[in-house]
Image (cartoon, rainbow, N blue to C red):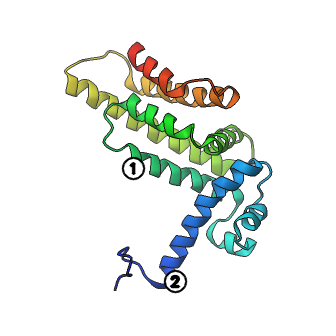
Amino acid sequence: MSSSDGSGTRGPYAKGVQRRKEILDRTLDVVASKGIDGTSLRAIGEAIGVSHAALRHYFDSREALLLEVLRERDAESTRRLDGVDGVLNRMAGAADHNVSVPGLVTMYTTLLATSVEPGNETSRAFFAERFEIARADLAGQLRDELQASGRHSDADLDQVASLIIAAFDGLQVQWLLDRSVDIAGTLRLLERVL
């Protein structure tokens, strides 16, 4: 039996899925307004009207919650940009969206920076896997684009993918410090250079 909303779920499970989504959606607002250092799991719960115990039911730690927000935003970005032609066009589209959500860029950058510190193994594993998947995906897309256009490149496309990711993340940091930095425009320049 399915629910009346057509989701195929019903009862407590559907409510739990919806509640978890609400927590993820609202957490970014809390981080954006209070900063990442001012957001303990308890503070996030209080700000969004969820008990600490209820929040712990869904997420083991603040780090787990924040990383899940990033996972959800990555999936959302992938859906939003599906069908956009060109690797760097998709990345420029992601950049255009990210500048409309500065709290997301701040959270991503902060979590990435702290992932290299001892004691942040969950974040380290998340980002290591995220970069590995992104490099492989980008290199594959670049190969497909070259093949479709009949062009050939002697460049190591895995290294080109690493360069593109480094440019994207570095431009986001520059933008956090100086909002006049044009992330999308610079990525489009990178496409012309490559």
Q: Position of residue 124 (x, y in %)?
A: 63, 44
User: Reading the chain from its start, which is encountered first: label 1 or label 2?
Assistant: 2
Q: Quadrant of residue 27?
A: bottom right
**Rendered view: 38 above or below 190:** below
Name the residue nearer the viewer: 104 or 153: 104
Which residue is at a point 57% across and 68% down the rendered structure image? 20
Q: Which mark is residue 26?
A: none
- Are dots 1 and 2 in contact, CB under 8 Å? no
Which residue is at a point 65% across and 73% down the rendered structure image? 57
Give the side of residue 81 with respect to residue 119, left or right. Answer: left
**Rendered view: 192 above or below 137:** above
Q: Quadrant of the N terminus?
A: bottom left
Which residue is at a point 62% across and 40% down the rendered structure image? 105
- Residue, disc 2: 12
Secondary structure, mark 2, is helix
Q: Position of residue 43 (x, y in %)?
A: 78, 62
Q: Position of residue 140 (x, y in %)?
A: 33, 34
How many labels were placed on the picture? 2
* Amino acid of disc 1: Arg
For the residues labelled 1 and 2, the Cα–Cα distance comes to 27 Å
Q: Which mark is residue 79?
A: 1
**Rendered view: 50 above or below 93:** below
